[in-house]
Amino acid sequence: MLRMEKYCENVKNDAYGGSIELVEDGITAIENELEARKPDDVMGEVEGYVDSILEVTSPILPLINMLNKCMIFMESYRGEGVKPDVLREKFITFLETVREEQRQCVDKIGKIGSRMIDEGNKVSTFSTSGSVMEILKNAVQKGKKITAVAFEARPNAEGYRTLYEISDLGIPVTFGCDALLCKLVPGSAMFFIGADAISSTGEVYAKTGSYLAALACREFGIPFYVAADTNKFDTMSLLGFPIKDSHRPADEVTAQKVPDNSRIINISFELIPPSLITGIITEKGLISPQAVSLLMEPEKMNDTMVKKLERWKEESEKLN
């Protein structure tokens, strides 16, 4: 049974291959914790879970938005005098609704993205993305014979997971290290990546190496698409918040000893400028990066959550 301590450890160690899995497990961990502990102060307990997850997470918007929804839900019952066991059950039902909404969004992205793929296409991708995998799975289910290109995706080499998942769909994969982007990308009909956050100005926050992939696609005239539901749109960027950096331990890059006068930089994510992005595939359709702000709903940000995120950003800046 997944509990909060183990989940936070997984988040801290960047053990998840994509935000879909991250949110799913977050919901499961909260549900399991509430069922096991049956707290009298459900609101206080849930806020404690939110704080624990924020302490270890990088700027992965679907997870942060899920935590925001949790705070909004609890605030709506403050002062209502609802019994703890009733509030707990209502909250668990709410979490299951959030889980189902995410699944429906990914399903729609898969259908939309697969229509863009033609028979015989060579499709490239980078890192691990549940939305991209859903697109490829839908293309295979429609009987389209395609090939794929994937990359190691340093520093944690999660691209190997992508290699196996695409291969399991029956799609032949050409696989290489990140330095081979310009060698393997030419001839692709399109390039797909997932995203962890998208700012109001259309900048996409994705796995380090994605920026190089976008530059390679521009060089070779290949459309570069981002597959991301609108839950990844960063409404905090409308309020002037920059996206938090994602510095990781140096030993994830190498176990070799580094000279005392040198250092290793290990950053998991980077920003891709909107000028390099052909389009964003969302559950609401294919949109341009410039249209992102039009689909944002900043009024849905919980005031308490905004204050938590302010502290979260400040603590990150102290560490880096």
Image (spheres, helix red, strand yellow):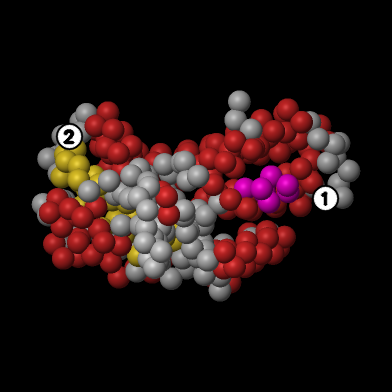
Query: What is the spatial separation of the Cα atoms under label 1 and label 2, in whole angstroms?
Result: 54 Å
Front-most of residues 306 and 127: 127
Q: Secondary structure at mark 1?
A: loop
Prevailing SS of the magenta stretch: helix
Q: Where does residue 282 sit, x and y in percent of width and height?
A: 40, 52
106 with respect to 79 (left or right): left
Name the residue: 19% across, 65% down.
218
Total labels drawn: 2
Which of the 4 image quarters holds residue 268? Answer: bottom left
Residue closest to the far top: 1
Q: Amino acid at mark 2?
A: Pro
Magenta stretch: give its range. Answer: 47-53
Name the residue: 12% across, 40% down.
120
Name the residue: 13% across, 62% down.
220
Label 1 or label 2, whichever comes before in sequence order: 1
Q: Which residue is mark 2?
A: 172
Q: Where does residue 132 sit, x and y in percent of width and height?
A: 33, 44
**Callout in the foreground (1, 2):** 2
Residue 247 in sight in this render: yes
Q: Is residue 304 highlighted in magenta?
A: no
37 with respect to 240 (left or right): right
Q: Where does residue 39 sit, x and y in percent of width and height?
A: 81, 35
The quadrant of the rendering that contains the N terminus is top right
Q: Amino acid at mark 1?
A: Arg
On residue 78, which mark appears?
1
Front-most of residues 141 and 189: 189
Q: Is residue 52 highlighted in magenta?
A: yes
Front-most of residues 162 and 14: 14
315 with respect to 121 (left or right): right
Residue 135 in sight in this render: no
